[in-house]
Amino acid sequence: MSSATSCPKAMTFGPCGGVRDDASCEIDPRPCPFAGPAADTVRWERELLPSTTPGSALLEAAEHRPVVLTDLTIPAYDPDGLAEVTRTLADSCDAVLVGEHQNRPDFPPTLMAALIAQAGGVPWVTLACRDRNRVVLEQELAGLAVAGVDGVLCVTGDGRAQGVRPDVTQVFDLDGTQLAALAARAGHAVAVPEAPSAVPQRLRPARLVQKQHAGAHLAVLNHVGTAEEVATFVAASRDLGLTIPVIAAVALYTDERSARVLQNFPGLHLDPGQVAQVLGAADVRSAGIETALDEARALLAIDGVAGVNLSGLASGDGALAGAQVKAETGHLIREGA
């Protein structure tokens, strides 16, 4: 397969997590070249990287107890706002996950990591291949090592939505699996994503194992409808040789806006009945937190799940309100765990 010509992201180790339910590409209506009926797992046949685990507060904690990783939702280009959100979250989780968004750019990863550390947070920073070629990614990895990042999440990245910065070229010089290998060789603790419910589901466990071969130390899963689906996915992955810890996503929403943002992401699946029940509650905030706690408890009971990722905006009332919801939820999960 010539990924450079058949995949809009020029992926070698596909499919990405954004394959739509009809097996079409997230960028345009073409069929995903990695998702057809005859498609098989693209294997990592280069050097296996590495068996040793770099120093990381999150990974070390995961060896002893369930961990909480929390999405860092912040106002863009606002160091004071970033510091306030980080301080709000700092003692409620083991690390914060810095996202990378196709429609909402922010400070470069090295500066982001430094600002988070200064505010008392433990940063795991997402690196995406959409806007950076190999040279820039190598520079970012070197800079993040100096900035003191705890780990990096290596992703191919979402394609830019139609009408969002049409004047800017999308790079995709590498894909997420190749970037994971690059980050591991640079000495970083490396996380990789996987979408258990995304098409083709039958290839997802083996694909995660190939990312482990490329150097990943941690897997962070996208949302699925039920804990049972996560259990099935993790068991299948472990049967194929997965040994790295898995962090499962907990959907955290306390109003319609924060729920719809999660529901609209390709490759993510929430239980629509559960969403309707939360949004119809008399106290939506409390219902959203209680639903997230129930999901966290179910996920942490799964063999192979080392922690949870509090994911989403959490609140449509702004970054600080969302951080307060996440902090309250994180504290309750850690107390229960």
Image (cartoon, rainbow, N blue to C red):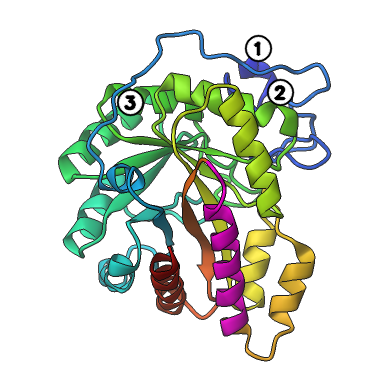
Q: Nearer the viewer, residue 50 or 188?
A: 50
Q: Is residue 177 left or right of residue 134?
A: right
Count how many numbered circles sit on residues in the image. Answer: 3
Image vertical order of residue 176 relative to residue 47, above or below: below
Q: What's drawn in magenta, residue-wise? A: 286-303
Which-is-in-front pick, marks 1 and 2? 2
Q: Earlier in the sequence, mark 3 or mark 2?
A: 2
Q: Earlier in the sequence, mark 3 or mark 1?
A: 1
Q: Nearer the viewer, residue 206 or 323?
A: 206
Q: Around disc 3, counting alpha carbons within 10 Å, would you say few (fewer than 14), some (14 to 19), or many (20 or more)? A: many
Q: Name the residue beneath numbered marker 2.
A: 34
Q: Earlier in the sequence, mark 1 or mark 2?
A: 1
Image vertical order of residue 196 relative to residue 226, above or below: above
Please report the residue visible at 39 percent of the width from the left and 71 percent of the height from the top.
Answer: 331
Q: Amino acid at mark 2?
A: Phe
Image vertical order of residue 2 relative to residue 186, above or below: above
Residue 150 on image: x %, y %: 26, 45
Q: Name the residue beneath numbered marker 1.
A: 2
Q: Name the residue beneath numbered marker 3.
A: 184
Residue 104 on image: x %, y %: 48, 57
Does the stretch in magenta take in 213? Answer: no
Q: Around disc 2, counting alpha carbons within 10 Å, would you say few (fewer than 14), some (14 to 19), or many (20 or more)? A: many
Which-is-in-front pick, marks 3 and 1? 3
| Residue 245 visible to an observer of this rendering | yes
